[in-house]
Image (cartoon, rainbow, N blue to C red):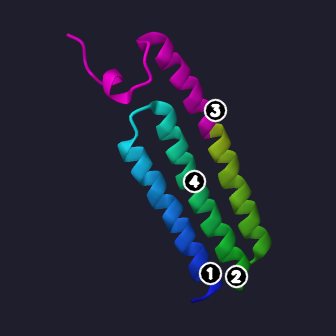
């Protein structure tokens, strides 16, 4: 088994653990953490593919930095939304927020 295959399997593992957490987590912060795991898996896959194939390694690293920047911006925005939701609904449970009143 090659090193690229091992890295891709670890990236797939991170992606699947993140997806599992996104589906089964009850709190909004837990969902954000799971989403970050998924994004880190994608970044690992990009770097591994760029380093271990004839592709340009610098472009893979720049692509991963771009993914990390998007993840940081996404986390900041989502955490701000979570703070507003907690202030308004007094809970961070996703199931209680999605219920309609009426």
Compare marks 4 and 3 and give the one earlier in the sequence: 4
Tell me, yes or no, whether the two marked residues, 2 and 1, touch with CB atoms within 8 Å. yes
- Residue under label 2, please give it: 52
Compare marks 4 and 2 and give the one earlier in the sequence: 4
| Residue 50 covered by magenta stretch | no
- Residue under label 4, please give it: 39
Query: Which numbered dot is residue 73?
Result: none
Magenta residues (range) = 74-102
Estimate the x, y position of residue 53 in percent, counting from the top left: 68, 84
Q: In the image, is residue 94 above or below residue 19?
A: above
Q: Secondary structure at mark 3?
A: helix
- Residue under label 1, please give it: 4
Estimate the x, y position of residue 50 in percent, counting from the top left: 70, 75
Image point (32%, 28%), residue name? 95
Q: Secondary structure at mark 4?
A: helix
- Residue under label 3, please give it: 76
Distance Cα–Cα, label 3 vs label 2: 32 Å
Distance Cα–Cα, label 1 vs label 3: 32 Å
| Disc 3: CA contacts within 10 A as few (<14), some (14-19) or many (>=20) | few
Q: Main secondary structure of the magenta part?
A: helix
Q: Where is residue 4, by image quadrant?
A: bottom right
């Amino acid at each position: 088994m090659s090193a690229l295959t091992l890295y891709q399997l670890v990236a797939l593992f991170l992606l699947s653990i993140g997806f599992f957490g996104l589906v089964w987590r009850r709190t909004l912060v837990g969902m954000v953490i799971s989403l970050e795991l998924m994004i880190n898996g994608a970044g690992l896959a990009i770097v591994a593919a760029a380093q271990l194939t004839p592709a340009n390694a610098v472009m893979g690293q720049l692509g991963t930095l771009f993914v990390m920047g998007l993840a940081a911006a996404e986390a900041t925005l989502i955490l701000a939304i979570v703070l507003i939701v907690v202030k308004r609904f007094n809970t961070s449970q996703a199931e209680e927020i999605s219920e309609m009143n009426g």
